[in-house]
Image (cartoon, grey):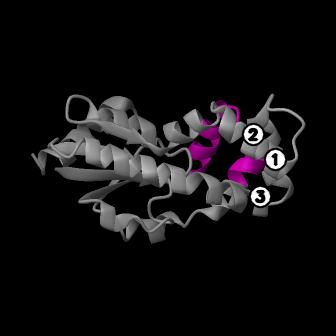
């Protein structure tokens, strides 16, 4: 089994890359999807309500974004809750799929979390800051939140040092797909 890690800076196109790579080649794990599902669980919402003293769980994500913008230590609190859950789910995914030739794991903070040893190959998805900001805003994010989250991540130059392949995701999907499939051919 080859464990392929996919990482990159915020809004670089990691999910698009992961879907292209995994299509017909192997199962795909998304840390972001694990987090999204967490926000749908009543027990998680109750925990967040208690910690941040929210009155209700309606618009909990919006309320959390505001809390994080008010004080970036709130992001650290959230990471301490979320990261262990994501790691546990990642381990379960790897165990469930140990007989597959390839598995693909999209982990936004793979380098920052020092998870490199868990992967056979790491692909870094790169895009300019202006393109990433445009993508982030298109999904409903603010420039202020983008700037804060972007500053929290290591620079592209530092992350690239730990990666086996760099994919620039600034053009069309056709070019992206060709470049990604060329990388996969190296390991088939």
**Residue 114 visible in the snapshot:** yes
Residue plotted at (29% across, 48% down)? 94
* Disc number placed over residue 74 in the picture, else none: 3
Q: Which residue is mark 2?
A: 46
In the rendered structure, the answer to whether residue 131 lies left or right of residue 2 reads right
Which is nearer the eye, 156 or 79? 79
Residue plotted at (40% across, 65% down)? 160
Q: Please, what secondary structure does the residue beneath circle 1 have?
A: helix
Q: Position of residue 25 (x, y in %)?
A: 20, 35
Q: Which residue is mark 1?
A: 50
Does the CB distance between marks 2 and 3 fall below 8 Å? no
When the figure is inspected, residue 6 is found, relative to residue 141, above or below; the finding is below
Closer to the observer: label 1 or label 3?
A: 1
Q: Residues under labels 2 and 3: Cα distance?
A: 16 Å
Q: Position of residue 172 (x, y in %)?
A: 39, 32
Q: Position of residue 96 (x, y in %)?
A: 27, 41
């Amino acid at each position: 089994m080859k464990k392929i890690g996919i990482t990159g800076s915020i809004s670089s196109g990691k999910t698009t890359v992961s879907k292209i790579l995994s299509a017909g080649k192997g199962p795909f794990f998304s840390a972001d999807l694990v987090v999204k599902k967490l926000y749908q669980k009543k027990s998680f919402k109750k925990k967040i309500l208690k910690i941040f003293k929210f009155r209700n769980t309606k618009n909990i994500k919006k309320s959390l974004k505001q809390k994080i913008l008010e004080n970036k230590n709130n992001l650290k609190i959230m990471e301490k809750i979320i990261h262990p859950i994501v790691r546990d789910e990642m381990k379960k995914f790897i165990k469930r799929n140990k007989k597959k030739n390839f598995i693909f794991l999209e982990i936004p903070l793979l380098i920052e979390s020092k998870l490199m040893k868990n992967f056979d190959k790491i692909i870094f998805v790169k895009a300019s800051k202006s393109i990433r900001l445009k993508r982030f805003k298109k999904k409903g994010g603010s420039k202020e939140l983008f700037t804060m989250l972007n500053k929290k991540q290591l620079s592209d130059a530092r992350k690239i040092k730990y990666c086996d392949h760099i994919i620039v995701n600034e053009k069309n999907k056709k070019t992206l797909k060709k470049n990604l499939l060329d990388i996969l051919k190296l390991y088939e």
